[in-house]
Amino acid sequence: MADEPRWDDIFPAQNSSPTPTPTSPAGPPMTRKEALAAEARARPREEKPAKVREKKSRKSRKGWLIALISVVVILGLGAGGAAFAWANYEPQIRKLLGWELPPPDYVGQGSGEATIVIVKGDTGVEVTNSLLDAGVIKSFETFYSLLLAQDPPVDFYPGYYVLAKKMSSQAALDALRDPASRVEQTALIPEGKSIDQVFEILSTATGISVEDFKTAASDPTSYGAPVEAPSLEGYLFPATYHFDPGLDARAVLQILVNRTFQSLDAAGVAPDDRHRVLTLASIIQREAGRNTEDFYKVSRVFTNRLNAGWHLESDATVSYGTGRTHTVWTTPEERADASNKYNTYANPGLPIGPIGAAGDLAIDAALHPADGPWFYFVPVNLDTGETVFSTTLAEHNAAVRQLQEWCRTSKSPNCQ
């Protein structure tokens, strides 16, 4: 991590010469500072009232700000320079003056449209992540802190909510509380959701029970899935669906499977290769985060490992095999358990099937990995999704320490 800029870095010395000042007739040329000082000495001194001195003391902190602006003006930068300095060095200036840096947030009601789904049992962490993923809010910390401050606590009701993008945290919370934001008969399947989560979403949208969907999905081959598919996991495409009234569970699932085949066909995937591509794409989807470029880099890491005969060692696959689909955190004991057929630490190659719903981006990344020598990657900020890609184990271990330090200082619930 780069060192923080020093004062000289924030306000570098100027190369221009100072403005010429008048000279004294009785001696050598004086600088402007010396001339002003001489003029001040020539004026009679006046005793300042005690109240004035007391007022000046009380406003000493404000004086720092005035001094800061004065430095900018003296350097010839003017108001535009002050704005430039604030825009580029706000954290350093705030630190210098002892001002707390406010958490990031959008302003106002936002614009455009974003849809999120809240299913039964979703916690505040999951709702906040859904808002962040959809581009509704700017910061996990800002919204989640606002949520925790509510008294009484906020109750979220399952359903589909249409909000704007880039809303302030308060505006987003108000919108979630507004019944007018909730829509019916629409199912939004986000990328990366597991089949059980998809069933919950479909049940919320259609009124069909989760058990009916589980029963209808018991024979994957009847929908056109290959015989090696252990379930319909990965074959229920993530998209927004509008269902006609009266459809049963099987008809709903067939619509989602057909949509999966539509995307695979459009990507040029042969029917015999569907299962392999969907399996790899689902791992990329769960591991890649929010940066679209990272999808292709993650694909390259896994491709390099497969080509070199390495194990994939994806925590997301291990976690899926344990039944936990809300996290990618695993324990050493779980990573050593070869009986978990989705465990890519203990077993070679790809797992036995997809671990979630892969979207078009993940499918394309599985087919077209980026060029690169990377064999490792790790996110170093779980709120922004910032990820470090490494070629050597030493580089990777350094990045892991970055993540550990971030989790220690941020105390984010995403670290659990």
Image: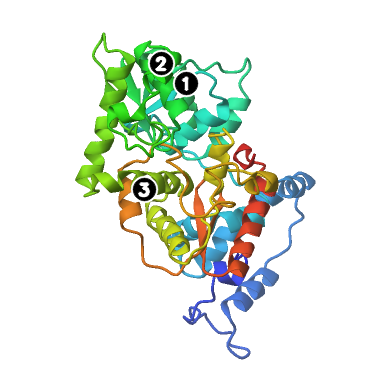
Q: Position of residue 372 (x, y in %)?
A: 41, 68
Precedes in sequence: disc 2 or disc 3? 2
Q: Secondary structure at mark 2?
A: helix
- Using the image, determine if residue 4 lies above or below residue 291: below
Q: Which residue is mark 2?
A: 204
The amino acid type, in three-letter code, at marker 3 is Arg
Q: Which residue is mark 1?
A: 119
Q: Residue at x 60, y 67 (%)?
A: 393
Q: Local crowd at mark 3 within 10 Å, few (<14), some, or many (≥20)?
A: some
The amino acid type, in three-letter code, at marker 1 is Val
Q: Nearer the viewer, residue 187 or 19?
A: 187
- Using the image, determine if residue 8 lies above or below residue 119: below
Asked if residue 2 shows in the view, the reply is no
Q: Position of residue 403 (x, y in %)?
A: 62, 53
Precedes in sequence: disc 3 or disc 1? 1
Precedes in sequence: disc 2 or disc 1? 1
Q: Which mark is residue 101?
A: none
Q: Nearer the viewer, residue 106 or 57?
A: 106
* Disc 3/disc 1 C-alpha distance (Å): 30 Å
Residue closest to the far top: 246
Quadrant housing residue 109: top left
- Using the image, determine if residue 91 lies above or below residue 258: below
Q: Secondary structure at mark 3?
A: helix
